[in-house]
Amino acid sequence: MSPKLIAAQIKAVASSFPVAAIKTGMLFSAEVIHVVAKTLKTVNCGPLVVDPVMVATSGARLLKLDAMEALFREILPRATVITPNLNEAEILAGCNIKSLKDLQKAALIISKRFGTACLAKGGHLDGGKVVDVLCVETEFTLYTAPRVRLRGTHGTGCTFSAALTAALANGKDLHEAVAIAKSFVTQALRQARPTGQHYPLNFLISKYKMVQH
């Protein structure tokens, strides 16, 4: 898809609906990043959640190297919150992450570097629990849930940031929005059903359970 068409889509949605929050995901190239950053300046869409999609769970790079500088300069400083996974947090913070303490350190570095909140996702750390770290300025909040051990899951990080954006759009503050998003993803994993050799997240049951509670 051409950058020109992406800009036209953003403008069409923003002019047609009362957009209360916006999320970016995989932007891939410097050209796309330039046009997204430029277009976001022309629309009023509330909080901006940036999922800095650079490295997949498999370790595969999803962002061109020449696009990283553009992402760092043009998108990340505009974010309300950045939501990197462990591998992305290592790139953004410039340090290795082997423990929860390392994850907290990285979240602080990222928050200071880009002048915004950072939610560093800890799903790739070992342990029976998954701990995510929210750093707002110099204050940390930890969000913990039992690990749901499934093979062949994909998109948990993208779902987390999307659910976080939805909660912000519904008027929740950042801390509550993170808690809602984590609960949503955990329930979606718990209710996953096998599809071939994979266990895709079950969004519908997760949503139903959250409404009931």
Image (tube, rainbow, N blue to C red):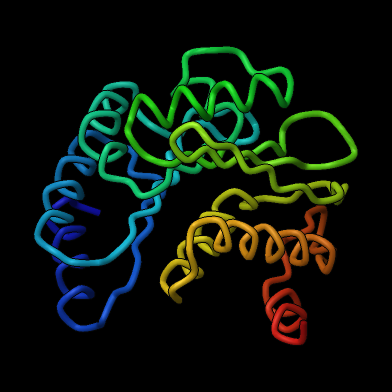
Nearest the viewer among 149 and 64 is 149
Q: Residue at x 54, y 12 (%)?
A: 95
Is residue 133 positioned above or below 43 on the image? above
Quarter where residue 77 is shown: top left
Which residue is found at the position 18% from the left and 38% from the top?
31
Asked if 96 appears above or below 104 in the picture, the reply is: above
Rendered location of residue 49, percent (x, y): 40, 53
Closest to the observer, 87 or 62: 87
Q: Is residue 86 above or below residue 143?
A: above
**Quadrant of the rendered image containing residue 32:** top left
The residue at the point 74 percent across, 66 percent down is 188
Residue furthest top in the image: 95
26 relative position to 83: left or right: left
Residue at figure coordinates x 32%, y 46% from the top left: 79
Residue 75's spot in the image, x, y percent?
Answer: 26, 40
User: Is 96 on the left or on the right of 68, as rendered?
Assistant: right
- Quarter placement of the C terminus: bottom right
The image shows residue 146 at horizontal and vertical percentages of 86, 49
**Image: 178 above or below 67:** below
Residue 200 lies in what quarter of the image? bottom right
| Residue at the extreme front | 139
Q: How many marks?
A: 0
Q: x%, y% of residue 47?
A: 33, 60
